[in-house]
Image: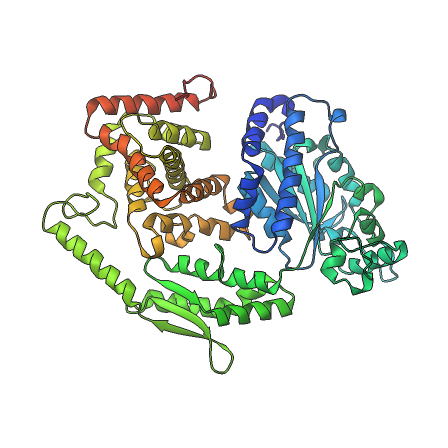
Amino acid sequence: MSDVRASGFGTDAGGSVEAIERMLARPRDEVVRECKRYVVGQDAVLEEVVGLTYSCLQRMEMRARGVDDLDLPRACAFMLSGSTASGKSFIMKVVAKVMGLELVSIDCSGITGAGWVGDSVSSELRRVAGVMGRGDGRPVLAFWDEADKLVRKTREGGRSFDSQGNFLKLLDGGRLELAPEAQGQHEVTLDAGRVLNVFAGAFMGIEDIVRKRLLAGGLAVAGDGDKVAPGLLTPDELRSRMNLQDLVSWGFMPEFVGRFGAVVCVPSLSCESLRRIVKGSERSLERRVSNLLGAGREFAITDAAAGKIAREAHASGLGARRIDQITNHFEAEATVRLHADADVNRATLDVGDDGKLCLAFDFDEDAAGEKDEAACAEDDAADGGSDADGLPAGTSRFEPNERLISAVDGAVAGARWSEAAATPEGRELLARRLAHYQRWRVRDTRSVTGAELLLEAVIGYLAVNRDPDMKQTLGNVCALLRFAGIHMRDGWTYLDTFFFGRVEACGLRGLEERACSDPAYCSCDAVRALSCYRRYLELPREVRAEAARLAEARAEDAAESDREAAWLRADINAVADAVDKEGFGGAPLIF
């Protein structure tokens, strides 16, 4: 068996440069905005972390282009400091997903030295090397959680064995030769220059160290230069003034700390931020549970209940984790009842007269009216002719049009669709080729961009969806696009449910939920599909409607015209040629 190696830039420079260029091509403000969709109450931290990540990627890009390490800043590493449940791990998972970085999460609490019981730094780096070797040139973000556990304290207050010294070569950014540690293993080469190392820890008690330093220095600790007694500062305010020297005083080796570029303070979540996590944000508990229930059912939380849950979570010191502990029972009860009882379609979590949380169920008359209208529309279609969406007589508005799928797939028979759509780059090129259809005259040029985003999102959704019935063909893409025009309440469409529902409800967002416990579960392809769809949703409603029609137009014309079908097959095959082993240079992709 040949050795498993993580290729360096010298052997895969082209792919590495292209991968990093794609990450840096997105405006930093856009990445921050995307991260804020997931992370609540940590705006300043997100801006700082994304800025540090961009700086590290720029260094990696210059190194990949052949610039000498000695002419570049020190290799990339920084520290996150925040109390328990402040969101350190979640922030880095979100940043990694949004930016497309490969993420490896490592728990430092179990790390020992070579030969000791437990995992060594070397064995964890072999994991990083394995992820890097399987990647497509993208850098790896190594997230070292519970980094404060690297300092082992004795009962007498001194330090016992710690493994900080084993990180020094990694943080220097050179090539590491990782020797076998068990029978059957081979030597592994890790290019540490392609690794962004982020350490995180709670550092309990470090506030006292910061306070003593401020008192000893007589510093002006207020933002406007006024003198403020350090003893009056809150723990979060003291942490915000923490520096690398405080980490040394806390117990870290100066050689270890000296290799960090910055310390980022992650403050505890405020009561208002916790309330928004319960209700009022895109990732709120209210919306997540509603997504689990599926179309036509709703889980609502009153303002009184949201405030009570947030106050209890804040008082516990467990942050957002406490929110789930408080509400798990109510979520389970609502889910079982709404799925079992067809006459009930809304569950409301409220505060009862006794001051305790309680769950109420009711029947939504507005939703019932919409169901009746939908039934009437289906009955009208069954009587003959077409319905309001132009579907053939007898076809439900809420089911894929099998006739359309068959016609489109028949028109492109012989095209290498599966090859062209097998990679993110291929799906992007397919979306561009399909959206730039000259026979469609647009009223707003933004609709072309919207059509590209919508097509790439739908193709990507089909590629990563785990439902075996969701086949990835051009006909299925057209059928799925139809759901963009079928509206539910509050402007929500059935296509939104496909994207934002949980795994059990055919949605990609559920992959993000699973990734909290298993980062490998949520692929970069899923994140990219969600990102494209969210950018599509930012366009005005009339532009989105035109973009959806544009996204369908070319394939539908091909189903009716042999000449259009031939042109479409040629374009699909050109994309397939562009993404094969020859690379992207062989196909004319300029529109």
Residue 406 percent location from the top left of the image: 22, 36
Residue 182 in view here: no
**431 relative to 30, above or below:** above
Residue that appears at 28% across and 67% down: 365
Considering depth in this image, is 51 or 179 the residue closer to the camera?
51
Residue that appears at 35% across and 27% down: 436
Residue that appears at 33% across and 23% down: 571
Give the quarter of the image for residue 423: top left
Which color scheme did the rendering employ for the protein? Answer: rainbow
Q: The C terminus is located in which quarter?
A: top left
Residue 168 percent location from the top left of the image: 78, 38
**419 relative to 89, above or below:** above
Residue 51 percent location from the top left of the image: 64, 40
Q: Is residue 281 left or right of residue 452?
A: right
Considering depth in this image, is 191 or 112 the residue closer to the camera?
191
Q: The N terminus is located in which quarter?
A: top right
The furthest residue to the left: 383
**126 relative to 298, above or below:** above
Residue 342 percent location from the top left of the image: 28, 67
The furthest residue to the bottom: 354
Considering depth in this image, is 257 or 273 the residue closer to the camera?
273
Residue 221 in view here: yes
**110 relative to 14, above or below:** below
Q: How many marks?
A: 0
